[in-house]
């Protein structure tokens, strides 16, 4: 489990510089981290280069100056991620050690034990022969969806065929032509299954729809 936050997306050069210096100030000469990767010398050099690039583009600069600044920002970001990996290995889950390196901590994720009933379900005749296209709104925590298919209009009576989909839509194939089918959706998570959705029905055409 990753306990250190390393998502640096959206940080501009100044924000990245601030983050990098916080980590540097915590890790430099810290006996808990005797052999960081990258080394503190290389890390500090990259920070100094980014700082110089920020100064060179302050209030202006050429396209090359801004390009170089972006490259130096990306290099520092990569180094921060490498240091985060090193700290994780040293800490072995000890949050006190992680915090001493100046990194933000991830909140432990709680397992999702209940899933909401799928909503927004629709079904319509497919563009391919003997098919129905079904859609619904995504359910938070769902890993896959179990699509319950029953022959008949707005009914739950009779044999049920199951279609598994990893997305919030699917094509139901191999249906009898010119028959109505009822579709209900169930979200399936790691620890739970949702209630079945309300019914939706569509006609399986026996020829290619116009």
Image: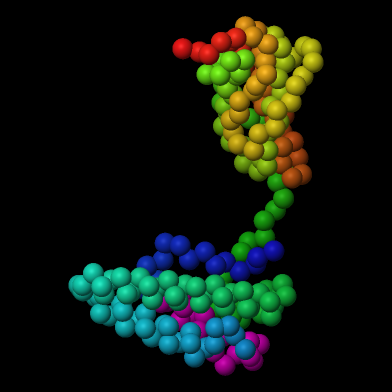
Residue 187: quarter of image: top right
Residue 113, how many percent across, how many down? 74, 44
Q: Any magenta on residue 108?
A: no
Residue 58, how many percent across, how many down? 24, 75
- Please report the residue visible at 55 percent of the width from the left and 67 percent of the height from the top: 6
Prevailing SS of the magenta stretch:
helix
Residue found farthest to the top: 178
The number of callouts visible is 0
- In the image, 119 versus 133, the foreground residue is 133
Residue found farthest to the right: 159
- Please report the residue visible at 46 percent of the width from the left and 12 percent of the height from the top: 210
- Please report the residue visible at 60 percent of the width from the left and 9 percent of the height from the top: 206
Q: Is residue 145 above or below residue 5?
A: above
What's the coloring here? Answer: rainbow
Left or right: 171 as drawn, with respect to 163: left
- Which residues are the magenta region? 17-34
Residue 81: quarter of image: bottom right
Residue 20, how many percent across, how many down? 46, 78
- In the image, 108 versus 181, the foreground residue is 181
Residue 114 shows up from this direction: no
Quarter holding the N terminus? Answer: bottom right
Q: Is residue 177 above or below residue 61?
A: above
Q: Is residue 136 above or below residue 97?
A: above
Left or right: 11 as drawn, with respect to 192: left
Residue 117: quarter of image: top right
- Please report the residue visible at 56 percent of the width from the left and 70 percent of the height from the top: 104
Residue 51 shows up from this direction: yes
């Amino acid at each position: 489990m990753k306990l250190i936050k390393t998502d640096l997306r959206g940080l501009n050069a100044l924000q990245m510089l601030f983050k990098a210096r916080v980590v540097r100030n915590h890790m430099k000469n810290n006996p808990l981290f005797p052999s960081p990767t990258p080394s503190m010398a290389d890390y500090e050099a990259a920070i100094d280069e980014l700082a110089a690039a920020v100064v060179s583009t302050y209030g202006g600069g050429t396209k090359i100056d801004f390009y170089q600044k972006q490259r130096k920002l990306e290099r520092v970001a990569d180094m921060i991620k490498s240091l985060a990996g090193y700290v994780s290995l040293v800490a072995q889950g000890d949050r006190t050690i992680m915090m001493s390196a100046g990194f933000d901590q991830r909140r432990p994720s709680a397992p999702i034990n209940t899933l909401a009933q799928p909503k927004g379900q629709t079904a319509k005749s497919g563009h391919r022969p003997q098919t129905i296209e079904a859609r619904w709104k995504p359910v938070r925590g769902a890993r896959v969806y179990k699509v319950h298919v029953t022959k008949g209009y707005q009914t739950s009576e009779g044999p049920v065929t199951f279609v598994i989909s990893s997305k919030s839509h699917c094509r139901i194939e191999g249906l009898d032509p010119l028959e109505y089918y009822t579709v209900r959706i169930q979200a399936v998570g790691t620890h739970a299954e949702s209630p079945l959705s309300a019914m939706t029905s569509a006609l399986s055409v026996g020829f290619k729809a116009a």
